[in-house]
Image (cartoon, grey):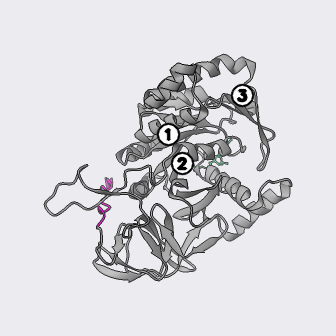
């Protein structure tokens, strides 16, 4: 999918306390996006297993710095965000290059210490977030209790977009409060079908109550929806979705979804939420250019918007060595870069030539000939570019704000 319009790109991270289900959720996302992209519908249970086996053989690229997948005509780049406290600097770095994040918390324990740390880091970079309460199939899972920990521990306005239907081994699906319908999975294996149905009668009152909160909260941040609301006593799905997106991006509230990644329930609606509510590169303010000498850093610094026609500007955020050589992962903020082009490393002050360019998919690396503003690619051939270096067009370079990271606190006692 080269040539994906900018508004159809999502650069996201998935973050969680260790064991909350980041790996499982990422695997499922790659599975569902891979299946929908390559195979279409899965009719045969074996297709599923084969696909996963193949991935294992090739070494699942979810450990890669950034993996690209497609969902409903959008490209989602998933940037790896290390979950462990030791990688604090790496978490910082990845939070700089993504535009939105999925925060996974556990349905039994709720918000755990590492989720709190990562949450604060994401706050620092104003990363828009949706929250996924996972493991609702587990014994002891309680959506409402886990939900309450969001307010208690993170002090946020958490806004459910879904409610669970059943819990523990009776968890079958979710109520979608935006469209006021139930989404129910049959079976819990990969590729299991799901369908829409009416909201169960015993949950209807609760659903209406939460729908009202959703309307009041979301429309309050998007006045345009209010008019429609007063006219009809309700709003269209598009209006409500737009209002939720506005509030999600501004951080006015944090939408909450739920499910069980392991039992394959809830991941497809989560992917829909990534498209609906997390920003594209054109929805975000853009990266700051470096402060002039003697100038103090702050909000007054000029920002550059994602524009493929502007001079190239990018940031090397991760370097990995694998059997093919050194891969430099770059977030492109402005311009268009073609393989063979030369760029100026503005951190080191010298020119470098871009060799081949790739995007990493679950099961393959796809060579691309050009990469545009807003997207992410891995470059081969950069000899002297380090993590955190900024790159620019050789002529008239725009120098981006350097990636300065807080020094981690190392306890040597
Ligand atoms: P990570 O450390 O956040 O990447 O967590 P993993 O995805 O590796 O999951 C940790 C453990 O929890 C694994 O044994 C998973 O199989 C299990 N797990 C993940 N998601 C779920 C879920 O939805 N339900 C249940 N019961 N187990 C899950």
The reply, left or right, for residue 295 in relation to residue 75 is left
Question: For the magenta stretch, what is the residue range?
Answer: 399-413
Give the secondary structure at mark 1. Answer: helix
Residue behind mark 3: 166
Furthest residue toward left: 294
**Does the magenta portion include 251?**
no
- Classify 143 as above or below 249: above
Residue behind mark 1: 245
Quadrant housing residue 408 = bottom left
Furthest residue toward right: 44
- Classify 214 as above or below 382: above
Q: Is mark 2 within 8 Å of ligand 1?
A: yes
| Position of residue 335 measured from the top left corner of the image (x, y, whole percent) | 41, 68
Residue visible at 34% across and 82% down in the picture: 351
Mark 1 or mark 2, which is nearer to you? 1
Give the secondary structure at mark 3. Answer: loop
The alpha-carbon separation of the residues under discs 2 and 3 comes to 26 Å
């Amino acid at each position: 999918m080269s040539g994906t319009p900018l508004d159809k790109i999502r650069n996201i991270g998935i973050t969680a306390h260790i064991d909350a289900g980041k790996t499982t959720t990422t695997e499922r996302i790659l599975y569902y996006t891979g299946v929908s992209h390559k195979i279409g519908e899965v009719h045969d249970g074996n297709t599923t297993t084969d696909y996963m086996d193949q991935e294992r053989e090739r070494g699942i690229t979810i450990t890669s710095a950034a993996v690209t997948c497609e969902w409903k005509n959008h490209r989602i780049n998933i940037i790896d965000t290390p979950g462990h406290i030791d990688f604090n600097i790496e978490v910082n770095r990845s939070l700089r290059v993504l535009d939105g994040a999925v925060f996974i918390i556990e349905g039994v324990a709720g918000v755990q210490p590492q989720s709190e740390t990562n949450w604060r880091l994401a706050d620092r970079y104003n990363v828009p977030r949706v929250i996924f309460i996972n493991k609702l199939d587990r014994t002891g899972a309680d959506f409402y209790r886990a939900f309450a920990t969001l307010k208690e521990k993170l002090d946020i306005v958490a806004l459910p977009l879904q409610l669970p239907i059943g819990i523990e081994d009776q968890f079958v699906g979710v109520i979608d409060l935006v469209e006021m319908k139930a989404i129910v999975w049959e079976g819990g294996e990969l590729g299991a079908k799901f369908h829409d149905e009416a909201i169960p009668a015993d949950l209807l009152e609760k659903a209406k109550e939460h729908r009202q909160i959703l309307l009041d909260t979301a429309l309050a941040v998007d006045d345009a929806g209010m008019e429609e609301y007063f006219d009809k006593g309700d709003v269209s799905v598009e209006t409500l979705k737009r209002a939720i997106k506005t509030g999600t991006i501004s951080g006015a509230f944090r939408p909450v979804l739920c499910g069980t990644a392991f039992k394959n329930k809830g991941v497809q609606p989560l992917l829909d939420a990534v498209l609906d509510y997390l920003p594209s590169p054109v929805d975000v303010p853009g990266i700051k250019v470096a402060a002039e000498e003697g100038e103090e850093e702050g909000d007054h610094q000029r920002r550059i918007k994602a524009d493929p026609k502007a001079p190239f500007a990018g940031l090397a955020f991760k370097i990995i060595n694998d059997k093919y050589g050194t891969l430099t992962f770059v977030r492109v903020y402005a311009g268009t870069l073609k393989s063979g082009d030369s760029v100026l490393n503005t951190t080191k002050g010298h020119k470098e030539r871009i060799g081949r360019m790739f995007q990493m998919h679950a099961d393959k690396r796809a060579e691309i000939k050009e990469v545009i503003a807003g997207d992410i690619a891995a470059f081969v051939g950069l000899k002297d570019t380090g993590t955190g270096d900024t790159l620019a067009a050789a002529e008239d370079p725009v120098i981006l704000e350097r990636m300065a990271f807080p020094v981690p606190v190392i306890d040597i006692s």
